[in-house]
Every structure is written in C-alpha cells, then in structure tokens.
C-alpha cells in the first residue's frame, strides 16, 4: 500500500476508462469503506466532476 507523505495538488493523466474506474471505486467507499473516508471520497468525486 502506498504511504502518503504530504498533500497537495497532483496532475495525473488517465484514460476515460481509468477515470470511470476511479469514480466507481470512490462510490463504493460509502458502502464498504470506513466512515472517516466518506467525506474525503465525496470531495474527490466532486473534484473529478462526478458528484
């Protein structure tokens, strides 16, 4: 598992298919993830334009 050492803005290139997979995974956080991660996942979905 990756260890996050700092936070900031990151530019990442992704195909449409990869982006959609990320969106699906983030939506699963509400069902299967830790409660503490729900808001963060929603914020990232919003940033990805998929709220």
Image (tube, rainbow, N blue to C red):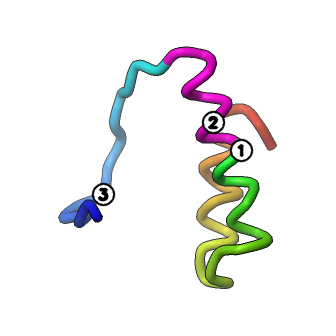
- The residue to which callout 3 is attached is 7
Image label count: 3
Q: Is residue 11 left or right of residue 22?
A: left
Q: Residues within 10 Å of mark 3 (few under 14, many from 20)?
A: few
In the picture, which quadrant includes the N terminus?
Answer: bottom left
Q: State which mark lies toward you, 2 or 3.
A: 2
Q: Is residue 46 left or right of residue 51?
A: left
Q: State which mark lies toward you, 1 or 3.
A: 1
- The residue to which callout 2 is attached is 21
Kindly identify the residue that appears in the image at 65 percent across and 75 percent down: 33
> Which residue is farthest left?
5
- The picture places residue 21, in percent across and down from the top left corner, at 63, 36
Toward the viewer: 9 or 20? 20
Q: CA distance from mark 2 to mark 1?
A: 5 Å
> Which residue is farthest bottom?
35
Kindly identify the residue that appears in the image at 36 percent across and 41 percent down: 9
- The residue to which callout 1 is attached is 24
In the picture, which quadrant includes the C terminus?
Answer: top right
Toward the viewer: 41 or 7? 41
- Span shown in magenta: 15-23
Toward the viewer: 3 or 32? 32
Kindly identify the residue that appears in the image at 62 percent across and 21 percent down: 17
Q: CA distance from mark 1 to mark 3?
A: 23 Å
**Residue 6, picture quadrant:** bottom left
Q: Point out the tag, 2 or 3, that comes first from the N-terminus.
A: 3
Q: Is residue 51 left or right of residue 47?
A: right
Kindly identify the residue that appears in the image at 66 percent across and 53 percent down: 26
- The picture places residue 47, in percent across and down from the top left corner, at 62, 40
């Amino acid at each position: 598992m990756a260890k996050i050492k700092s936070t900031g803005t990151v530019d990442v290139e992704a195909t449409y298919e990869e982006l959609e997979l990320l969106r699906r995974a983030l939506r699963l956080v509400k069902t299967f993830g830790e409660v503490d991660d729900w808001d963060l996942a929603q914020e990232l979905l919003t940033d990805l334009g998929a709220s």
